[in-house]
Image: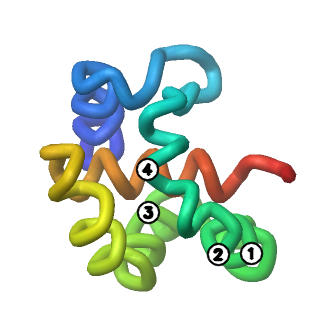
Amino acid sequence: MLIRNAKTEAVIKGLATINSPLMVSDDARSAFSGMADDLRLYYKDTGKFLTENDLFLDMQKRFGDQIFKDICIPLKIINNSCILIAIAIAKEQD
């Protein structure tokens, strides 16, 4: 339910679109540009071995404070949507 609610907010706020998989908007991608490489490295080394729920929780634990301060507050969205977008960006290949 946590992930579904995050998807709903991300789509409503225009930060993602409902496709399969979730598509990150250019605005959201820009907001994460400063930490995208760290997110991808984390996913490559650790995240890809976790279930979706565990990945969500671990990303929140590892990056949550930085994401909240640098992205959620400026974009005026709750942390769960930011974590969802961070996961989508982490899964992307360069």
Q: Alpha-carbon distance for marks 2 and 1? A: 5 Å
* Residue ID at (74%, 75%): 41
Earlier residue among tags 2 and 4 = 4
The percent coordinates of residue 85 (x first, y second) are 46, 46
CB within 8 Å, label 2 to label 3: no
* Residue ID at (30%, 46%): 81
- Which residue in the structure is indicated by mark 4? 31
Q: Alpha-carbon distance for marks 4 and 1? A: 18 Å
Earlier residue among tags 1 and 3 = 1
Quadrant of the rendering where the N terminus is positioned: top left
- Which residue in the structure is indicated by mark 2? 38
Residue 56 is marked as: 3
* Residue ID at (14%, 45%): 76
Earlier residue among tags 4 and 1 = 4
The percent coordinates of residue 65 (x first, y second) are 28, 79
Q: Nearer the viewer, mark 2 or mark 4?
A: 4
* Residue ID at (44%, 26%): 16
| Kind of residue sitting beneath label 4 | Ala
Earlier residue among tags 4 and 3 = 4
| Kind of residue sitting beneath label 3 | Phe
How many numbered circles does the render carry? 4
- Between residues 80 and 72, which one lies in front from this camera angle? 72
Q: How crowded is mark 2: few (under 14 residues within 10 Å), some or many (20 or more)?
A: few
- Between residues 54 and 28, which one lies in front from this camera angle? 28
CB within 8 Å, label 2 to label 4: no
- Which residue in the structure is indicated by mark 1? 41
The percent coordinates of residue 82 (x first, y second) are 34, 52
CB within 8 Å, label 2 to label 1: yes
Q: Tell me where residue 7 sits by quadrant.
A: top left
Instruction: Say left or right for 47 vs 19.
Output: right
| Kind of residue sitting beneath label 1 | Leu
Secondary element at tag 3: helix
